[in-house]
Image (tube, rainbow, N blue to C red):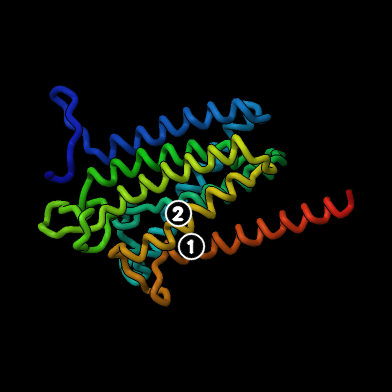
Amino acid sequence: MDFPIYISFGLFKLHPHLLFESLAYFIGFRVYLKMRGQSKLTMIQAMWVVFGAIVGASIGSKLLAWLEDPMRTIEQWNHVSYLMQGKTIVGGLLGGLIGVELIKKRVGITRSTGDDMIFALITGMTIGRIGCFLTGLSDQTYGIPTSWITGIDFGDGVMRHPTQLYEIVFLVFLGVLLYFIKKNIPLHDGALFQLFMIGYLSWRLLIDFIKPTPHPYWGLNNIQIACLLGLIYYGWICNKNISGERKRTKNA
């Protein structure tokens, strides 16, 4: 295959990253509206949540991307073209989480909203990763060279781990697992989203060991550090919930 693989529509050819990123946002938003219909949020509240998620994700994805190579970012701080390049899913998830929580406090939403977003996020991320794969080397989401049977030549003669495809398989598995849990195991509001975040952050912590990005933070890269911080936070949340449940059971 020759990368990037452009998508043809008659006389027009669209870059795969642009096409699939646009589809990810559009379809993901439709899935969110569908899931929101099963919650108690009003349309206005749902739009505020989406606004907080978009703004937070935009800021978080950029900030974390700049930390991939901090010395280069410092050197290029006055070059707008460099600062506008790159973004990360992990930064978007964590930034979106912060943005949503701030918006919820601002508009008075007290219930958990994360469960409404899980399958929209998984859908959007899966579609987006298709675009990452079809873009090839310029997207810089591939893995390190490998002799595995799964290795793919993205155009420079080197067989590399197609980590984009690995992630698609993982996201499908995670989505099926969470859907099964949602249908068969009673959980408190927000617990399913916590499981999603723990699952995805754990995945990224591990898979980034086979990505050729700089690892300047004690052998870890910027995304892995963010994953560790996120896992510590969700570990604290889960422990807090378990303690609260035990207390309620004891007092019952």
Which residue ends up furthest to the top in the rendered image?
10
The numbered disc on residue 71 is: none
Which quadrant holds the N terminus? top left
Residue at the spot x=56%, y=30% of the render? 35
The kind of residue on which mark 2 rests is Val
Amino acid at the residue labelled 1? Ala
Q: Residue at x 45, y 54 (%)?
A: 90
Q: Can residue 88 be seen in the rendering of this structure?
A: yes
Q: Relative to 136, is 50 on the left or the right?
A: right
Q: Give percent across and percent down for residue 186.
A: 67, 40
Upstream in sequence: badge 2 or badge 1: 2
**Residue that sits furthest to the right in the current view:** 251
Please give the count of numbered marks on the rendered protein.
2
Could you tell me residue 232's position as x and y percent?
58, 64
Q: Would you say the residues marked 2 and 1 are in contact, meaning their CB atoms lie under 8 Å apart?
A: yes
Q: Is residue 37 above or below residue 180?
A: above
| Secondary structure of the residue carrying numbered label 1 | helix
Please state if 145 lies on the left or on the right of 100 as rendered.
left
How many angstroms separate mark 2 from mark 1 (CA)?
7 Å
> 117 or 81: nearer the eye?
117
The x and y percentages for residue 235 are 62, 61
Q: Residue at x 34, y 67 (%)?
A: 69
- For the point 59% across and 50% down, the residue is 194
Q: Is residue 211 left or right of residue 29?
A: left
Q: Work out whether 11 lies above or below 93.
A: above
Could one spot residue 106 in this view of the protein? Answer: no
Quarter holding residue 224: bottom left
Which residue position is annotated with label 1?
Answer: 226
Image location (x, y in percent) of residue 180: 54, 38
Q: Is residue 128 left or right of residue 240?
A: left
Q: Nearer the viewer, residue 25 or 156?
A: 156
Task: Name the residue tied to disc 2.
Answer: 90
